[in-house]
Image (spheres, helix red, strand yellow):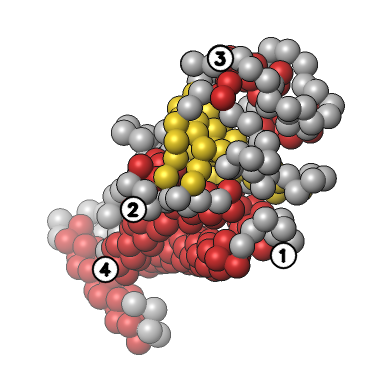
Amino acid sequence: MTGKPSDVNQPATAGAVSKGVIFAGYLGGGTIKDCGLADLGTAEDKPPYWAHLDRSESDAQNWLVRESGLPSAALHAILAEETRPRLESFDGGGLLLILRGVNLNPGADPEDMITLRIWAEEKRVISLRRFRIMAVQDVRDQLEKGQGPSTIGGVVTQVIGGLLQRMEPTIQSLQEAIDDVEVETLEEETPDIRQKLYGLRTQIVRLRRYVAPQRDALKQLLEGPPSWFSKDDRNRLRHALDQVTRYVEALEAARDRTAVVQDEMANRIGEMANRRIYLLSIVAGIFLPLGLLTGLLGINVAGMPGAETPWAFWAVCGLLGVLVVFEIWLFKRLNWV
C-alpha cells in the first residue's frame, strides 16, 4: 500500500484507475450502469454506486487511500493482509464488514476461505477481494439481467446471502464424509481411516475458524442495522444469520462426531492390545511350569533319575504333554480362556 490514509472523510476526486477495478457503476432499476472510478460520486442528485476492486493492485489501493474518502481506521482494516470476519460501525451510517467465503476457484480447497471486505454507506458500497468470489459475480450477473438490487442494502445483503449459500455444499460434503468414516469404523478399521479422520478434523477447524466469527458479525449487524437498511434487507439478513448459525452448529456437531470416532478407534486399538497381551500371558502361564520342569531336569548333577534309561526322554515329553493338557483344562475351568 502506498500513500498515507486520511483521518477524515474526503469526497472522491477525479483520477483514472484502470488496473484493480473489476467493475464500477451506478445502481438503479435493478441494473448497473458501468463507469470509471473518476465518474463516481455521492452527490444528492446521483444514484448509489458500487465499486468492486482487486485489493492486490496498487492502483486500487492508491485510489482508496487518496480519493475514496474512507476513514483512516476503515482503510487500515480494509487493506490489512490478515483479517477475521467482523463488523465495525462508523459515524454517519458507514459500516465495514469483513466476510469469508469458501474458495470455489479451480484447483483450490474450499476450506481455504477467501476474504471479501465491504465498505458500505447509504450512497455507495466498495468491495475488495483478491481471489474471485462467485457470490459477487452472481449479484453482478443479476444486475446485467436487470434483476439485481437497486439499493446499497440490497447489494450488501444479497452478497452475504450468496456467500452463505455457496458454503452449504461444502458443509454437506463434510458431513457425508464423516458418515462414511463412521460406517467404516463400525464395520472394520481400514488402514487409511485415521488419515481420513485427520483430514476431516483439519477441514472442520479451518471452516469453523471463520464461520463462527462471521455469525457474530451478522448478529451484530442485525441487532443494530444502519438506517438505510430496508425491511427487505433486514429480512434477508435475518435469513442469512439463521443460515450461518446452522452452519456453525453443523460444524460443532461434526467436530463432536469426529471426536467420538477417534475415541472409538482408540478404544478398539486398546482392546486389541489388551487381547494380545492377554494371549501372551496365557502362553507364558502354560510354558512357565514346563520351563521350570525342564530346567530341573537339565541340571548337571549325579543321581538324575532316568539319565541312563533309553525311553526317559519320551517319558518326559509325554509328561509335559499331559501337563499342558491339564493347564488348558484348568484355565478353561477358571474361565481364563
Task: Give me the C-alpha separation between circle 2 and circle 3.
Answer: 56 Å
Q: Earlier in the sequence, mark 2 or mark 4?
A: 4
Q: Which residue is mark 2?
A: 193
Residue 119 position by quadrant:
top right
Query: Are the two marked residues, 4 and 3, in contact with CB atoms closer than 8 angstroms?
Result: no
Which amino acid type corresponds to the residue marked 1 in the rendered image? Answer: Glu
Q: Which residue is mark 1?
A: 223
Image location (x, y in percent) of residue 190: 27, 55
Q: Is residue 209 above or below residue 265?
A: above
Q: Earlier in the sequence, mark 3 or mark 1?
A: 3
- For the residues carrying marks 2 and 3, which lies nearer the camera in this image? 3
Task: Give me the C-alpha separation between circle 3 and circle 1.
Answer: 39 Å
Image location (x, y in percent) of residue 152: 58, 48
Q: Earlier in the sequence, mark 4 or mark 3?
A: 3
89 and 272: which one is in front?
A: 89
Residue 64 position by quadrant:
top right
Q: Which residue is mark 4?
A: 187
Provide the secondary structure element on which disc 4 rests. helix
Provide the secondary structure element on which disc 3 rests. loop
Task: Give me the C-alpha separation between circle 4 and circle 3.
Answer: 65 Å
- For the residues carrying marks 4 and 1, which lies nearer the camera in this image? 1
Which amino acid type corresponds to the residue marked 2 in the rendered image? Answer: Ile
Tell me what residue is drawn at x 20 percent, y 57 percent.
Answer: 313
Q: Earlier in the sequence, mark 4 or mark 1?
A: 4
Provide the secondary structure element on which disc 2 rests. helix
